Amino acid sequence: MAPPITVALPLATAAAVAACHRWIPRWPALLLSAGASLAVAALGVSLALDASHSGLLLYWFGEWTPRTGHAIGIDFAIDPTGAMLLVISATLVTFAIVFAFRYFDTAGQFFQVLMLIFLAALAGFSLTGDLFNLFVFFELMSAAAFALCGYKSEEPAPLQGALNFAVTNTIGAVLVLTGIALLYGRTGALNFAQIGRTLGGRSDVLVLAAFAFIVCGFLVKAAVVPFHFWLADAHAVAPTPVCVIFSGIMVEMGLYAVVRIYWTVFSGALGPFHNELRNLLMAFGAATALVGAVMCYAQRHLKRLLAFSTISHVGILLLGIGLLSPEALGGVGVKLLGHAMTKGGLFLAAGILLHRTGSVDEIDLHGRGRHLGWLAFLFFFGAAGLAGCPPFATFWGGVMLNQAAGRLGYHWITWVALGGEIVTAAAIFRFTSRVFLGWGTAHGVLIAGAARIPEKPDTQGGHEHTPFAMYASATVLALLGAAAGMVPHLTRVAHSAALRMENRAAYAARVLDGVASAAPAARDTSATFPDLAQGCGAVAAALLLAWLTVCSPSARRALGSFHPLRRAVQYLRDVHSGIIPDYVAWLVFGVAVFGGVACSWVLWHATIPAQLR
Amino acid sequence: MALFLVSAAVFGTIYVAALASLHPMGVADAASASYGNRINAATVSERHITDAVTAVNFDFRGFDTLGEEFIMFASVIGTILLLRKHRDESEGTPRDQKAGREISPPSDAVRVISVSLAGMVVTFGIYIVTHGQVSPGGGFQGGVLLAAPPLLIYLAGEFQQFCRLAPRPLVEAGEAVGAAGYAIIGVIPLFLHAAYLYNFLPLGTPGDIFSGGTVALIDLTVGLEVAGGFIVLLLAFLEETLVRRDPA
Amino acid sequence: MSHLAYFVAAWLFLVGLYGVVTSRNMVHLIICLSVVQSSTYVVLLTIGYRTGAAAPVFVDIPPSTPAVDPVVQALMLTDIVVEVTVMALLLALAILAHARTGELDPNRLGLMRG
């Protein structure tokens, strides 16, 4: 079946459901939407298998194949990584649609319409080989996301969350478009391979500025510090199935865009700056991981807590991407897969909690979850997955990352990643112990000043018991995170996909000249005993941290009187003010830092001769 | 604030430096002009379309435009979703929200001009939609024009007439059909073993209204979608501000 | 002053950003966003312009006449429609925020603190 079906089918289904939304009842619409997204998932799996056999699958729209090595049409350049992201997206959307079938009060079928459009945008985003096409699907994703975020429009908080989300991401999109315009002005091309080939190996201020703008624009979507402020606000107020998609795949798509654009367009031109770029990306990644972890631990609203844990994990992924090596990139892919499933399961569990108790606030819910045994187990399971416990996929991703980092001499990455994972998992353990086990008191030392956002349940009626569909989808998704880690040769497949992604010359030759290249030689990564110890140790450390914070009075006193920590947390809280002008100021600051550093490389290389560097 | 000013200064410097290394306005070098020149050379000879911009939009880069059309669709659906009537709200007769504020009804001049212009704008809009492949125009531009006449009727003071002219279910359905139409026109070539969005209809003669094959059809569907979308937006906003009442 | 048009685009971007950061009214903020977006249109169009060339419409001129770049015009065209609808979505959010909280000042819409 042709690849465009992955985009055309959800779009056509969405339009069809919208056209007849007044006349068809709920069940047929649900089956139609879930069926469409399942079909996309199946198509994605077949594309992934095809792509791993034959390298890059190429599809030119409208039969506009390249003329004399120049592209005039738009193409889909499907490699295993893109197809895998498509499968993850479609799976998450299917689960979200099934989970949400009780969410229709006044909105009719529009929720499903927007979800399907979201899916089509994710599909096009992961498969495309054209820069402007990427931007179009980026905007499509954003438009659907803004509306879904502000869905509960009868309360004030969702509207503010959606506004924060929309304004910052629109500026990010404008940044991307500016970068695209600059590149077009230099190369006259919009196709990844074409631009990469035309840029060649030289770079000046324009190339670096375009790189900085495009990367920063996508990092806004990826919620990297200091572009991350919108994520927690959006997650706190969006309906739970929507949060699953946001944290599971939408944010990671920003990182995917950075990786894809770097390797196919800029890797030749930015070759001389390899080491500097590594340091820059890893600096941003480390900042994100740490800020995300600290803010995560300082939250009382579960969805905000999970959002900050996503930010922390994005920081860890960016650390891996910043290593600019195939094994690290493979590790990032595996970790992303595990995180998507596990985080999705956690958010669905949060949705069940909201449905049963009407709140997701740690202090308000103290001890009220004692009868929800299975739910507590789901939270524990998910938190273990986030900490990188074997056999979750996150564990394997961590192993690949640590080995790659060690090989390149960047051992500190391992410690930063470990710290982030431990603290975020500990936050969930702490929440679970307070709510489901009733431990500790109803006063939190660190979480006293956190945002308390009142919210009404997403669902209507039946709060005495949880529908089977909700429990089933949450459990299956959480289990998938563990099952993904047990797929044989997972690391070898990831390594091979990453090798393919990083090969700019082979990509251009395939897209523009039709020349196929041989499969790259990849290998399995095996986990040594220290790796296993680290994985289990992370879970143990997280449990210990949570227990200390909740149950041990001496630890709590020590935490409370540790002034630098309190001042740091207070400062971070003030910075996360919820006010759009502040967010935009930080955004511009981030772009200025990234762009300033990037452009300084050109000046440095131009003025200082090679011998003195 | 100081943070912003410093960052904006740095950002501005980078941007200006990058812009300064672009080619001067009006004189393009071979690399940056290659895409445009290829399109200009191919549009009449290969697709019989005399308007190169429409050719790029709906043929060469038709897939982009499908995405853009659905961005519009998603935003309209999103706005409808946001402005929907909630369970605790009610609707009343249209009036300006601010109680006690006196507005005079529109003057006769406004009413006459609006009503007479409405017909002309409809004709002009249909002309622009259908002639996209011949002269500057196309589905997007014509669709926006076609959304104006109901607004003119509203300006003439007749909100009820507006609602009757453009009933909500019809316009919403029309918009969705237009959106689906574009996706489906793209799917049909798949059954003919060609690529998605391949121009499979007879191409006609350049300069004729039926030239360009599928482009003529896509103009119509896009025009329907854009016009429908804008009218629905206007209806939703006007209902929210004029008709919706908050819970007491 | 061959690059003047480009600098106008940079100016628009900066002024729009300044407007967003110092805004005291949500509707004003959203309009400043559209100013920021229009800077990209100026850049794109300036890139595509060719001195002395005709518009890329060949209905009354022979197809081999030098014409300006149609690709950037096509990109811009659909972008404008997209911008309008996204602005509509944002304005709907702003209207509803005002209806629910009575506030239009972005500096006072601070429920998400911490």
Image: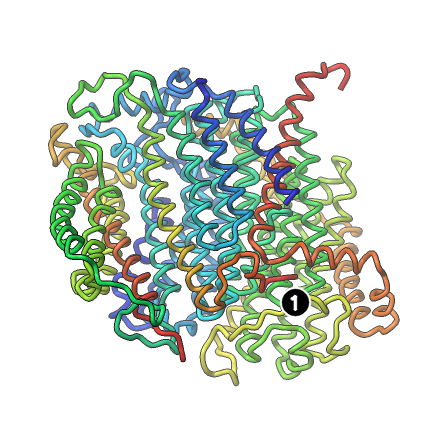
Please report the residue visible at 56 percent of the width from the left and 64 percent of the height from the top: A236
The x, y position of residue A554, in whole percent, is 88, 71
Q: Compared to B215, does A202 lie above or below? A: above
Q: Which residue is mark 1?
A: A381
Compared with residue C67, is residue A539 higher up or lower down, i.e. above or below?
Answer: below
Residue A138 in view in this figure: no
Q: Residue at x 14, y 33 (%)?
A: B211
Q: Chain of mark 1?
A: A
Q: Mark 1 is on which residue type?
A: Phe
Q: Residue at x 58, y 35 (%)?
A: A499
| Residue A335 on image: x %, y % | 63, 51
- State which quadrant residue B196 falls in: top left
Q: Is residue A517 above or below residue A300?
A: above
Would residue A207 be visible to someone looking at this image?
yes
Q: Which residue occupies the foreground of this view, B79 or C18?
A: C18
Q: Quadrant of residue A203?
A: top right
